[in-house]
Amino acid sequence: MPDERIQRLDSRIFQCQKTNPNPECQKQLLVVLEDLLKELKETSPVECSDIQNVLSQIWCIYMDCDKTFDPKVTKKFDQILMELEKEHPNVFRTSFEAELHSLLQRRPVTCMAANRVSSLLELSLATRQVFSEHLETLMGMISESLKTVTDPNCMQLTQGQHQLGYTTVRISLQLIQHFPDCIEKIVWGTDSSSSSMTRSLQTVLNQLMSIISLEKFAVDCAQLAGTTIARVLMQSNAGGYIFYDLLCHLGNSNILQVGNVTISLPVTEATITKETSQDSQHLTTGHLPLIFGLLSSGKHIELLTVIPNKISPPVQHEIVLLEHLFTKICNLVQTQKQYHTFQTLALWFQVSLKLFNQNKPIMAQRMLFSEKAETTTKILQVVWANWDSPIDGVAEHIAEIFKSFVQLHAEERRQYGDSKLEFLEHLLCRLLNIPWHVKGKFKPVCTLVPYIGVQQILDQHPDLPSHLVKCLSANYLAPSACELYKVIITELRKGQLEVEDQSLKIWERFWLPPLLAGLCSNILLLRQNAANYWLPWTLKTYPSAFEGICCTIGEQKHITKCAVEQTRLLYALITVKKVARGLQILRTLEQEPVREALYHCDDEVRKEAFALVCNTPKKAEPVTDLELTLLKETLPLNMNVDSAPFRQHLCSSLRSLVVRLVDSCSSVIKANKLCGTEKEIPQYLTKAIDFIDWLTNLCIRSLFPGSCYQRKKTSLDLLSVVLETSGSQGNVRKKKRTNPGPLPVLVIIAKNFNEWDFFSHTNAVVLLSCIQDGTAEIRELAAHILVTHFPWPLQIEGGTSPDHLACHILCHALNLCQSPKALDAESGAVLCRLVFQKYVLEHSMLFEVKTLPSGTYSVVSTTRNHDPDIPVRFVELLLEGVKLSLQKAEECALTAARTFPAHGFILALGPCLAVVNFTAAESLSYWSPIIQELISVIEEMVLKMLSLLAGKAQSKDVAPSFAEIGEAIESLIGVSEDDNNGDTVTTLSAEHQLILSWCWLNIKESAVLCGKLVRTLPIVIENSPGLLSVENLETIGDLFVSILTRCRHRGAIEGCSLGFIKFCRRLLEYSEPVLTAIPQSLLDQALSTLSSPHTSSSITRRSAGLPLLVQSIIASESRHKKHNLLNTTMETLLAAADQPEPVTADQKYDLPQVHAINIIKELFRHSGLSSAVLPYISRAVISTVHGFSSSSWAIRNAATQLFGTLVSKMFGPKRSRDDTSVQNSTTEQEFFAHYPELRPFVLTQIQDVVAKQQQGQFHLHPGLFPVLTLLAKLGPGMSEGQDSLLSDFQAPVKSLASSHIYSIRELAACSLVPLVMKDQQGHFLKYLISSLPDSKPDCTSFNWLHGTLLQIKKFLDSCDSTNLSFDDLRRLLLSKRWLCGSDNPCSLIRAQYLDLVTVLQSGHEHLDVPPELSEHEPRHVVVDGSYQQGTNSIGVGLWQRAHVHFMLSRTDRCTVLEHITSYLQSPEHEVRVICLEYLVKILTNSEHKVTLWDSIQKSLVGLLLTENYQSCLVMCMELIIDIYIKYKIAVHGDSKLIYARLVCLKTSGTSIGALSVPLLAVLVGQLIQEETDRECLEDMLCQWTGFVVESSKPSAYETFRIQAAKSLQIGGVAVFEYCRRNQSTQTIQTVLHLFEAGINVLQDEQSDVRTEAAMFAAILPRRESDVQYHSIHANYGLELLCCYICRVFACCLESLLGRLYSDHDVVTCLQTSADDGVVNLFEQEDLNIYAERCTFSGVLKLQLQAALGSSSNDIQRVLALHPTRGHWLETQIQKVTEHLSFTVSYLTQQCKDLPVFNPCLNAKKYAAITGLLRYAEILCQIARPKYAEHIEQMETAVQQLLQVSCIHPLIKMP
C-alpha cells in the first residue's frame, strides 16, 4: 500500500496539533482515518517490509493525539490498530511492545499518556498479553500518577489533575479486571519472588484508599477506586468478612492486613454521622465508594455472609453483610442528600433482587421486606421523603427502589403462600388519599397497580379518574398522571385479552367521561395535555373506541347551542381524528368538519385542523386533492396569526406536507422511471409542483414592505421549509444517504413548467429588504435563507452586475452601521456579515471604500484576487469606523454620537470574525496585528464611554450616581441649569438621549464583542500558535469588571454579562492554571468588596452588575468539576450576610450585607446551579429570616427579595396564582428531609413569638412572616398520627390566633392547616368549633375568637369533604349562634361566623334559619344603629356581604326574584355589589329560566337609571348586555330615557363609557324594530355609529375597542339592513361609520378584539358561494364585510375607492423626506402595528372587482343614474394618470443606481404606490367602455411605472 495516505494523515494531524482543534478540523481528520481503515480492509495485506514503517507512523500519530480530540477519532485509531494486528500479529507485537515500554516509562505521567494506556488495555487480547509481561511497570506508572494527585499538600485539584486521577483509577480497575489471576497470586499467593510486585500493588491500593477518603476527588472517581478495592478483596473466599473489617476500621487510622498486602486506612477528612444505637461505627466519606464498589464487584454471594453481632443492644437474629450495608447506606442517605447515595441504594436493591431470585429460601427466611421489618420502615421513609427530590436523577432512583422493594415484598409473601398482598393494598390506599397535586405519589402508584388490580382500584377509588384529569391542567403533573393512566388501561386491557368488548365497556364507564371532559375543557393546557398524553395511548390500546368517541362528540355538538361548547367539541373531534389518522385508524378525510375547523376563529381548532390535513404516519403518502384545495383556500388567511404556538405548529405541519409531496413525487418518478425530459407528466406531479410553487409565491408576496411581524415570521419559516426540502436539488435535506434520489428529476420537471424559480430576482430582493426589518428574528431568518440556500454572487435583473450589487449592498451596510439608531446599526451589521462571508471570504472580493465629509460611505469599486489578507483588510475597514468615532469623540461628543457612532461597526465585527476559519497556522500572522489593535481600540472605547458618563464625579474608579451621569451628559451638550430658567425639566432632550444611547450601546456591544473574541479566537498556550495571549485575556477581564462595577445602565450590564459568560466558559474549559486563574482572580477581586465595613461605592439597585459578575464566573465552571468556586464563594457570601451591622452606617454607601444577599439571590436564581446550591438553602433561609429583623431598610429589602427566590427554589415554580393554594406546597417529609436544619429553627422562631405574646407584649416579630409562609406551604404526606414532623408546631401556631395583628391571625390560620394530618382533620375541626365560647361572658379575647374562626374557615376550604361530617359540624356550629346575634358587638366576627354557616349549609336549602340570622329585612341588611357609628363600624361591610351571601345561597328558587329585587334596591352599595356578583355567577352557570331573567332584566334597568356607584354600575351594565346576548331579552322601559342616560354615561370613565356603546346597540336594535320616529331614529343611529367608530380606533383603549366589536355584533347587522331599506345621505354616512369600525376591529392588534369582531362578520348576510359557518376567522370576516358593502351599498363607491387611494396620497408620501436635520432614535410607529394597509386594499380591490363583474352590477347602475358621477370619474382618471407620471419621474431620479435599497422599501411609499395601481385598475374596469382614450393614457402610465428598473419587484407581480 502506498504511504501517501499515511503522509496525508500525518500532515493533517500535524496541522491540527499546531492549531486549535476545532470540530471542523476533526471532521476532516475523521474522514481521512475512515479512508485509511477502508483501504486497510479492502486492499491486499501490506508487505512485511512496509508494515514496520506503517506502524511507526501510526504509533507516532496515535500516541501524540491530543486529549481534546473527539472520542470518535481515538476509536477510529483503535480500529486501524486492530486491523493491523489481525493481519501481522508478530510484527505488531514487536512494534507494540517497544511503544508500550516507551509509553509506560514516560515521566511525568500525562493525562494523554494515561488515556492511551487505558485505550490499549481494551484494544485486543494481543495487547493485553503484552501488558501482562509488564505489569510491574504498569503498576509503577499507576503509582507515580496517583502520587501526583494524592499529594496532601495539594488541597484542590485542577481540571487536568481530575482527569488524570480518574483515568489512572480506571486503569487500576482494568488491571484487576483483565489480570485477575496475576493479582490473586500477588495478594494471596505464597511465592516470595513476587515481593516487588506485591509492594507495587500495595502502594496502588493505599493510594486508592486515599482517593476514596479525600473529599477533593469527584465521587465517580472515588467509586471506581472503591470498585477496584472491592474486587481485590472479593478474590478471597472470606471476602465478606474482610470487607466487613474494612468498613469497621475505616476512619480509625488502623492497619488492615489483606493477604500479602498491608492496607493503611487514612484518617478521613470528615465524619458524616455520629454513633447510633444501630451502628457503632463512624460513617465517613470513604464508606460510600467502598459499598458501591462491593455491590458492583459481581461476587454477590458474599453479601450473605453472617457478620459478628456488634450492635448494642444486641439483636436476637443474626445479621448478614447485606443488612449491614443497607443500614449504612440508609444512614448515608439521611445525612448526605446526594445523587450517589441514592444511586448506591438503588444498586443495593438490584443486587438484593438478584440474590433473592438465586437464593429464595435463604432470602425469604430473613423477612427483610415484610410489613414490620426495619428495612421496610426505613426504605418507605426514604421513598416518601425523596420521591420528588430537586436533585437531578434522584426521583428516578427512588422509583426504581420502590419498584424493587414492592417486587421483593411480593416475592417474599409468595414464598409463604400469601397472595393477598394486604400491605401493598394499604400502601396504595394511603397514596391515593394524598391530595392529587402531589407529584411524587404517582410513580409508586404505578408500581402498585399491577399487584392490586385495576377493577378493585377503580371500585374503591371512583374519584381517581377525575383527579387524573385535574393533573392534566398542570405541566408538572401531566407526564406522571399520564404514566399512571397508561399503566391502568394497559393492565385493564391485559386483564381482558380474550374479551376486548368487556374491557372497552369498563374503560367507557370509568374513563370516557373524564377524557371528553379534558378534551372539551375551558383550560387550554388541560385540553392540550389530554390530547397529547391520554388520547394517543387510548386509541393505541382501544382502536375500536374511535368511532364511539366521535359519535359521542358529534351528538353533544348537535345538541348544544352554546358557541363556546361547540368550539370545544369541534376541537375535540378534530383532535381525535388527527390522532386516529396518525395511528392509521382513520384512513380518509371528509371535507366536513375539517373545513369548518380551518375557518374557525379559535387558533387551537385551526392548529389541530392543519395538523390533521398535513400529517400522516407515512412520509411518502400521496397528498389528496381535497387536502391541497383546503390548504390553498385557508392558508392565506392564517399567515398573520399572532399566536406563536400556532405559527410553530403550522410550520411543522406544512413541513410534513411538503415532505410528503416531495417523497410521494419521488415515488412516482421511480415507478414511472422518469428522467425529466418526457412530454407527458403524471398529473400528480403537476399538482404537487403547482402547490409548492404556489406556496413559495404566497410566502414571497407576504414579505412586502409594511407587512406585520407575524406575517413575515410565518412566511420566512415556510420559505425555509420549501427550500430545505426541495430548493437545492436535495443537497440541503439532511438525510443519511448521500444520493439525492429522484429529487433532481423533479426539479427539472418543475423548471420545464417555468416553476420553482426559488432564486429569482424577486426573491433575492425581497429577502434582502427583510434584513432592514426592525426585529432581529426577521433579519436573521432572511439572512440565514440567503446564506444557506441562495447561489452567490447574487444575480438580479435590471442590468445590475453582480459586482455593482455587491458594492451597493456594502455601501448601504456601512451607512446603516454609521446610524445612531440601534435597529439600523443591527441591520447594517447583518449586511456586513453577508458581504464578508459571501463576497470577501468565498469570492475574494476587495472593496475600495471612501468616507465622505458628511460621514457617509461610498463604495467605489471592487476587485477580485486571492491575497490571504483580504479578510483582514475588510475587518480593518470596520475597525476604522470605530477609530473615527473615538477621534470625533475627543473633539465633540455630540457630533460623534450623531454622525460618527461606533456601535454599528463594533456589532458587525463579531459576526464577521465568527465565520473566519482560524485553524490555518499560516493565516494567524495576518490576523495577529489587527486583533491586537482591535482589543486596544475596544479597551479605549469602553474607558472613554465610562469616562464620559462619569464626568466630574469624585472618583473615576467607582460607579457615578444617576445624577452625576445626567450632569456629565448635560455638560457635553453644553446645557446648564441657567438655560432652563430654573424650571424643572421632566423629559430628556433629544441630544441627551442621543449621547446616553451612544455611550451604553458602545459599552454593551464592546462587551459582547470581547466575549465573542475569546470564544472564537485561538489562545496562545505553551508556545502553541494563537491570537490571544494571557495579557490580552487579562485586559479583557479587567474590561468586563470595569463595566460591571462602574456602569449603572441595565442594558449595558446585561449585555456585558453575556460576553463575560463566554469569556469565563472559554477559560475554564482549559486545564492550564494560567488561564483558569484569571476568572478566579476576578472573583476574588469582586468578593473583596464584601470584606470592608462599607463598600467604597454605591451602586445600589440590586447591586447593579456585581451579582452578574459573580454569577457568570460561578456558572461557567465545567460540569465535570466539583464546584470549588461555588463552595468558597457561598461560604464567603453567607459569612458576609451574617456580619453585624455597623452602629452608624453612611446611607451614601452600600452595606456589604446588601451586596452579599443580592449575589446569593442571583446564584440561587441561576438554573444551571440548581443542584449545586441545594446544600446552602437552609443557611440562606436562616440568614434571610435574620435579615428581616435588620434595622437597615436596604438589608430588609434585599432579604425580602432573596426570600422570594428561596421559596421558589424550595417549593418549585408557582403552579397556582393563589400563594396559599395546595398546588404550591410540598409534603412535610420531603421538605424537612431536604432541609433538616430548618425544622428546629422555624420552631424556635415561632415559640419565641408565642412566649412574648403570652407575656402580653404587643410585638410583631419580623421573622414571623417568613416562617409562617414556609409552614403554610407544607402539605400532608405519608405520615400517620404522631409520626408527623409537624406535630410540634400545632400548639404554638394555634396560639397565634390571639395575636393583636389581623394579618398574623390570617397567616397563622393558613399555616395551621398543613400541620394537622389528613386523618385527624375532622376531629381537629370539631375540637376548634367546640372551643368556641357558648355565650358572650365566656369570651375572654375577641382576637382569639376571630383567629379561631379563621382557622376553622381555612380548614373547611382545604379539607376533603368526604372526610368530614358536615351535619355534625353544622349542628355544633349552630349551637354557637350568639356569635351572629346582637350580643356580639364585633361585625368582623359575626361576618366570619356567618361565612362558616354558609359553607356548612350549602346544599340544604330548606333548613330552619336561626332567628339571629334572619332578624333583619333583606333590603336593609344593616344591624342596629350602633354599627353605623364611626367607633364600631369596622367590619360592617363584611357583615353585610356575609348576610346577603347567606340568604341568596340558601333561599328557595321560587323566592329568589323577591330577594334579588330587594337587594338591588338596598341603600347600601355593598349589598348591591354582592347581589350583582351573585347574578353574574348564576348567569355564567346558566341557572334559572328565561322568564326569571326577563324579570331580573327589568330590575337591572331600573338600577341602571339610578345607580351612581361605579362598581355596581359596571356590573349592572355587563349583566344587561350578557343577558341580551344569551337570551335575547329586550331592555324594558322608556327607550329614549335609557338612551339619554347611556349617552351621559359615555363620558363617565373608561369602563362605564365603553360599556355604554354595546348597551346603546341593544337600544338601537329595539328602536329599529319599533320604527316609531324615523328622523329621531336616524339621528340616534348616526350618533351611535360615531361612538362605535371612536371606540374602535387604534388610539382608543382596549376596553373601548372590544366593546365596539361587541356593539357591532349586537346591532351592526340590524343597522345595515335598516340602511339598505332606507337609503339616504344620513344612512349612507351611518353605513360608512360601521364599515370603518368593522375594518378597525377586524384588524385590531389584540386577538380578543378580532375574535369579537369576527362574530359580527359571521352574522352578516352572505351569498350561497360564501362559507356558511357560525364561527370564522377575522381575516375571512374582513373579506365578508368588504364583500357585503361592495355588493349591497354600491352608492358608497367614492368612499370605497377612497379606501384604496386618497387624493395626492403618492405625491404627499414621496415628497415627504425623513431627513429634517433632527436625529430621533426611535421612529413613531403606527398605533396599530398589526393592521396592513396593503393587505386591506388588496381585499377591497378583489371585492370591488367581484361586484363589478357580477350579473347585477349595482355600481354601473349607480353611475348611470347619477350623471355627475361620470364627471367625477373622468377627473379621477386624469388625476391618477398625473400621479403615475409623477411617481415614474420620482423613482427614476431618486433610485438611480439603487437596485435594492431604495425608497420603494419604505412601507408608506410602497403602500401608496400599490394603492395607486389598484385604484387605476378599478377605474379601468369601471370606465373602460365610456372613457377609452383616458383609460389608454392611464394604462400607458402604469406600464411606464412597472418598467422602472428599481421598482420593488412585488409591485410588478400580478
Image (cartoon, grey):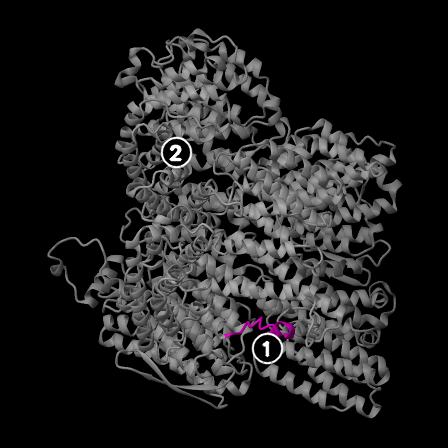
Q: Which residues are magenta?
A: 748-760
Image spot of residue 1132 (x, y percent): 45, 55
Image spot of residue 1199 (x, y percent): 40, 45
Image spot of residue 356 (x, y percent): 84, 44
Q: Which residue is found at the position 25% from the left and 76% from the top?
A: 890
The N terminus lies in quadrant: bottom right
Q: Is residue 1651 visible in the rendered structure shown here? A: yes
Residue denoted by label 2: 1261
Residue denoted by label 1: 21
Whether residues under marks 2 and 1 lie with C-beta atoms below 8 angstroms apart, the answer is no
Image spot of residue 1352 (x, y percent): 49, 21
Query: What's the amino acid at mark 1?
Result: Pro
Q: Residues within 10 Å of mark 1 (few under 14, many from 20)?
A: some
Tag count: 2
Query: What's the amino acid at mark 2?
Result: His
Work out whether 1327 lies above or below 1522.
Answer: above
Majority SS type along the magenta span: loop
In space, the residues marked 2 and 1 are separated at their CA atoms by 61 Å
Q: Residues within 10 Å of mark 2 (few under 14, many from 20)?
A: some
Q: Which residue is found at the position 28% from the left and 54% from the top?
A: 1764
Q: Does the magenta-highlighted stretch encompass residue 1276?
A: no
Where disc 1 sits, the SS reads loop
Work out whether 28 lies above or below 992.
Answer: below
Work out whether 1498 lies above or below 807.
Answer: above
Q: Nearer the viewer, residue 754 or 234?
A: 754
Q: Viewed as shown, does residue 1252 lie left or right of 533?
A: left
Asked where in the image residue 399 lies, by quadrant, the reply is top right
Where disc 2 sits, the SS reads loop
